[in-house]
Image (tube, helix red, strand yellow):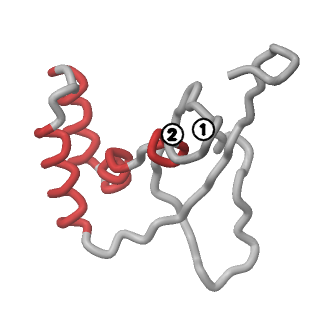
Amino acid sequence: MTTESGSPRYIRLQIELIAEIVDEKALQAAALEQVENDEYLEDEERAEALEAINLDPSGAVAHFIDPVAMLENIPGVELAEAGWETQPVDYDAETEDWEPFEAGSEE
């Protein structure tokens, strides 16, 4: 996409979410099913995905993240690139000193 001057214009969209896993077995089962049924995954990618899901619930959550879906209904915007990661985090809902976008958390 280009601006009226003819040059491309890009923005970085940063979103940080804290998700509470309330049923780890259900999450893992759903992620395993999604990976097993994904016809676009190559064997090596599928094996890595299955390992990540079985290793930690944060690996399972990553398979439900879809940056394309976040932008698909916004007129005049196309996804140029996306990267994301999930990781366990110490979080206390009662504390007010939690700060999003800590150094090194941009993806």
Instruction: Tell me if label 1 and label 2 are in contact, CB under 8 Å.
Output: yes
Q: Earlier in the sequence, mark 1 or mark 2?
A: 2
Q: Nearer the viewer, residue 9 or 57?
A: 9
Q: CA distance from mark 1 to mark 2?
A: 5 Å
Q: Would you call the spot at circle 1 few (<14 residues within 10 Å), some (14-19), or many (20 or more)?
A: some
Residue corresponding to mark 2: 84
Residue found farthest to the bottom: 94
Image: 15 above or below 77: below
Quadrant occupied by the C terminus? top right
Residue corresponding to mark 1: 107
Q: Would you call the spot at circle 2 few (<14 residues within 10 Å), some (14-19), or many (20 or more)?
A: few
- Residue 81 image-quadrant placement: top right
The dot on residue 73 is none
Q: Nearer the viewer, residue 71 or 81?
A: 71
Q: Secondary structure at mark 2?
A: loop
Q: Is residue 24 left or right of residue 8?
A: left
Kind of residue indicated by mark 2? Trp
Q: Residue at x 58, y 77 (%)?
A: 92
Q: Is residue 81 left or right of residue 3?
A: left
x and y percent of residue 11 in the render?
74, 35
Q: Residue at x 74, y 28 (%)?
A: 10
Kind of residue indicated by mark 1? Glu
Q: Residue at x 15, y 57 (%)?
A: 29
- Total marks placed: 2
Quadrant occupied by the N terminus? top right
